[in-house]
Amino acid sequence: MSFTRQDEIRPDDRYYWVTANPDGSYTGTPKELEDREEVDQDGNPMYVKVLDKTDPENPVMVDSTERLIYKGLKSNHIAQVKQTANSILAQTDWMVIRKAERNIAIPADTVAYRAAVVAKASELETAISAVTSVEELITLNLSFPTE
């Protein structure tokens, strides 16, 4: 009869490469924080592949001039912060456009909220860039102000 340990806490897949062990425990290897230029098994630089259609009868994948980059946790978290801030700001972008096109004032609370979102995004990007370990990154509070 086999059993699975219930006392083992699985490491967070967002931050660790997780392996399940035969005894029901887990091994978590931290993902890389920094971006990394990829190389092949011989140490040669790897490049993004593109479809070459010079010969329409025989299209082939070829290397581009763009290096292949593995995005680390910092880059992924900063991208998420930017996406979240943009989504929040998009809800009131129409007021900014209305102000620019027809000179209709933006309510002061909206101006203040938008400024708070932009400031928080900048603060989070700085904090994410400064972390030196996965554990530090996990402890960051990535929440934004609410209206």
Image: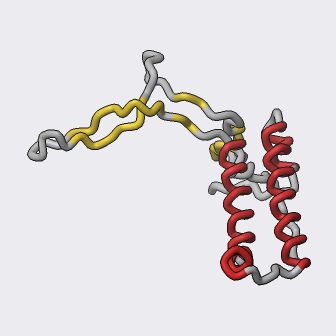
In this picture, residue 18 sits left or right of residue 49: right
**Quarter that holds the C terminus:** bottom right
Q: 35 above or below 1?
A: above
Q: Is residue 22 visible?
A: no
**In which image quadrant can residue 17 be found?**
top right
Image location (x, y in percent) of residue 13: 67, 51
Residue occupying image coordinates x 90% and y 78%: 109
Query: Is 21 in front, or is 80?
Result: 80
Query: Is 129 in front, or is 32?
Result: 129
Query: Is 80 in front, or is 7?
Result: 80
**Quarter that holds the N terminus:** bottom right
Residue occupying image coordinates x 85% and y 77%: 110
The mark tally for this picture is 0
Q: Is residue 142 visible?
A: yes
Image location (x, y in percent) of residue 81: 73, 56
Q: 90 above or below 134?
A: below
